[in-house]
Amino acid sequence: MEATINNRLGLKELASKVVSADVAAALISDGDVVGMSGFTRAGDAKVVPMALVERAKNEKFQIDVYTGASLGPEVDKYLAEAGVIRKRGPFQGDKGIRTLINTGDVLFADMHLSHGAEQFRQGIFGPVKYAIIEAAAITEDGYLIPTTSVGNSPIICDVAENIIIELNISHPESIIGLHDIYVPAEQGEREAIPLTKASDRIGTKGIKIDPSKIKAIVISEEPDAPSLIVPPDEETQTMANHLLDFFRSEIKAGRLTENLMPLQSGVGSVANAVLDGFADSEFKDLEVFSEVLQDAVFNLIDAGKVKFASATSITLSEELGKRVYSDLDKYADKLVLRPQEISNHPEVIRRLGLISINTALECDIYGNVNSTHVSGTKMMNGLGGSGDFARNSRIGIFVTKSYAKGGSISSIVPMVTHVDHTEHDVDVIVTEQGVADLRGLAPKERVPLMIENCVHPDYREQLWAYYNEAVEKNGAVQTPHILSKAFEMYENLATIGTMKK
Amino acid sequence: MEATINNRLGLKELASKVVSADVAAALISDGDVVGMSGFTRAGDAKVVPMALVERAKNEKFQIDVYTGASLGPEVDKYLAEAGVIRKRGPFQGDKGIRTLINTGDVLFADMHLSHGAEQFRQGIFGPVKYAIIEAAAITEDGYLIPTTSVGNSPIICDVAENIIIELNISHPESIIGLHDIYVPAEQGEREAIPLTKASDRIGTKGIKIDPSKIKAIVISEEPDAPSLIVPPDEETQTMANHLLDFFRSEIKAGRLTENLMPLQSGVGSVANAVLDGFADSEFKDLEVFSEVLQDAVFNLIDAGKVKFASATSITLSEELGKRVYSDLDKYADKLVLRPQEISNHPEVIRRLGLISINTALECDIYGNVNSTHVSGTKMMNGLGGSGDFARNSRIGIFVTKSYAKGGSISSIVPMVTHVDHTEHDVDVIVTEQGVADLRGLAPKERVPLMIENCVHPDYREQLWAYYNEAVEKNGAVQTPHILSKAFEMYENLATIGTMKK
């Protein structure tokens, strides 16, 4: 182990900074704004947060935690449940912290994942006192090598006053070279981001750091928490088939070729399952330009369907993680991890012409999408990068099963209770019932497509009744609604346990 | 006049294409998709549309009209009222067509103004049969020189099967050189847009056209319809002062300098009046990077406050228009008009770090903004470029008076009835009451700022009562709401004529 540490700690002057997790955790003060590495449970610091959990047993203190995206249970469950987190941003996905957000015990700033870096740069979250960053190595020439995610770590290291490194020596040395770190300059002094292909490398192998900021290095061998996705089921397979048929019709219309355009697929089981559907398709030489690479992407690389994948994070199931990380060399020329500011940047997304596939919690008959709030009030996981991609991609697709809770909830409603993606940002909606291609359509043109193609048969009549009554009462205005009945389905759900009339 | 025409028609082979407006209008067929020049009543074709109005007196036919943005009365009033427009996009601002949109007689596809060019490129609106484009000249080397707007004309000329030119010889010859035409390549083959300063010129003096597409040239001397803005009043001046104070506090915080960042200001009286507020301020060497330049920008150029202004359109009052166009040389090194795909491009907006100022129709206590729909159903003007700017700018500001209709409407409500800009896209809200700086805040942190700083005193208690009851009933969830009462203020307005309790 000593040899490995020496090997991974190229800047010898830092050897004296190696301390225990407890010592590192003691550096953090009550009220600190802390930036942490990690994106969708990958590449997050683990042992220092757990030392903070221990410390909190004897001491009351609170910090604000801003990261790349969701972290594993060390922060988003244990640290949150220990009462240490006052405020959290920009994304989370653990039941632990979610519960506390919805009891008001933790404040949650939900934001576009491409916006975080600009906010750090401008100091919107307050001065960042400490960065806690997982690294696979610090090279002789002064680069911090991230592990399984890059996230916001480059900008956090840049703006933080002090840095604590979790040097995770369990990663294979071949992880060096996986990353491509490019950080835009200040606005006003900024050049174009010189990325024109998903596979372009435009930056450095790691994050250039100021060694004098490093106040502690803690050795870790903790693995990432495995991803929580569930396997595809019959309905997600049906959705995948609908989506593939949609792509085929786009090819027929001359708008796509069989290589499609670079694909983005959101976090979660449904998006992963839908991507899995490409395995047995005729599509080939696909590229992925996404924020997170889940199991499906690696299966598609192995199957020869995907030739290159770019993201900011790799989040795998336990089994696939073992296979991939034990044989990382195999993927060396097919993978790159970038800062989330680049993977999610509007500039790059629109230039490359992505096809984005994200999961909707619910949508309405006019194509507005709610990605975050159950019944308009309770936070699920947050917005994530869905807005970065949906708004700027060539085709912004949302997928959702047409119903939830065994049919007592329709995922398509008259009016969503919270809007994360407006009608102007949503191109195509896919459920297990079919596809609604909303591009270029006025709201009233969208309604029949949504109801007939996407809504579960059990709810079609009810949604038509709402729409027809709205037209009858208000006339054929731009967007017919009856405000007093727009949320009636939710009220039914709350009172009688089902949205069904 | 003959001499002027010769002078403006550099491609001599086209002389035979000069016809009357009636002859040109007869080329259009029932069912055609027609792309037209024009952006916020500037640079739009006028005489061919009026010939179409005449033709419609004796013949029933309908077309789809897609443009840069809103057009003058020739299209958006007379042609619409003649029943000729089946569908319209992506923006409008005339009472004539608005009424027909809200009776269901005209379909309206409301979209981000930066998205239109991509939609044209992909053929989403169907094959564009005719382009009708106002031009100041066609040069010897084959460039079409736009007039007072560029809008979507470059991409429309590119994708249209046939082109009708309205050669408007009333514009001074000095208008040649005002424009900078840069059109991105197809996605997948696209380079970075090489624009890093508001004043950069990256393209050509005009739109390179295929002369064989030109089927008719109609000579015109019709002026643009003058802008409809009303002068600043006491409340807009108060809003301007609040905004300037906000900028001063940003300078104090080290986030801005006294040159600020390039300013974008939306269409309309309020945004114009707010910009007017800079005239007597200490700010200087300002740059404008906007979609439309209204009176205020020229006043600020004249006052030496603005050193450069970039946009896609110039929309002036009658008086100022006379002054500016009779002396256009004076502004030659201070102005550029670009395609709206560039003026509104997320890539450029985020790179330059704009400060955007747009008008909200209403917003809610959590910072969601409605820009388009009165009571959630009736279309006003449309989204325009507000989303392009708000989402991607360094600071996205929305301005609105805190009340409307003499106080019977509060512009801040518990929940907006239509969302055009989500809580994730809105940084700062300014009313005549004050400023709510929402950056980095969780929804519950936004509420006191919105209510205490922005809401009219007459409505504060009522909004607090809603919020407090929501917290009481649902707990301090991420976004407290009572769905059954979220729209109660609108229901009051409809039944008793006021939102006041």
Image (spheres, coloured by chain):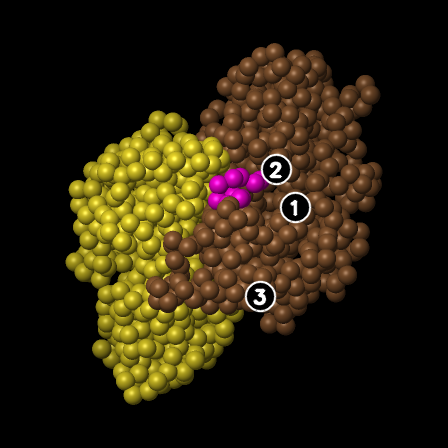
Chain colours: A brown, B yellow
Find the magenta span and give its range: A372-381
Residue A332 versus residue A37 in the image, above or below: below
Of the two numbered discs 3 and 1 in the rendering, the one whose residue sits closer to the viewer:
3
Q: Are marks 2 and 3 in contact (CB under 8 Å)?
A: no
Residue B303 versus residue A136 in the image, above or below: below
Can you give x and y, in whole percent of width and height, for residue B66 in the image? Answer: 40, 68
Report the residue marked by disc 2.
A93
B135 or B7: nearer the viewer: B135
Amino acid carrying label 3: it is Asn
The residue most toward the front is A496
Magenta includes A374?
yes
| Residues indicated by labels 1 and 2 sit on the same polypeptide chain | yes
Can you give x and y, in whole percent of width and height, for residue A459 in the image? Answer: 55, 61
Residue at the spot 30% in from the left edge and 84% down from the top edge: B55
Which mark is first along the chain, 1 or 3?
A: 1
Chain assignment, label 2 = A
For residue A413, the mark is none
Can you give x and y, in whole percent of width and height, for residue A269 in the image? Answer: 68, 48
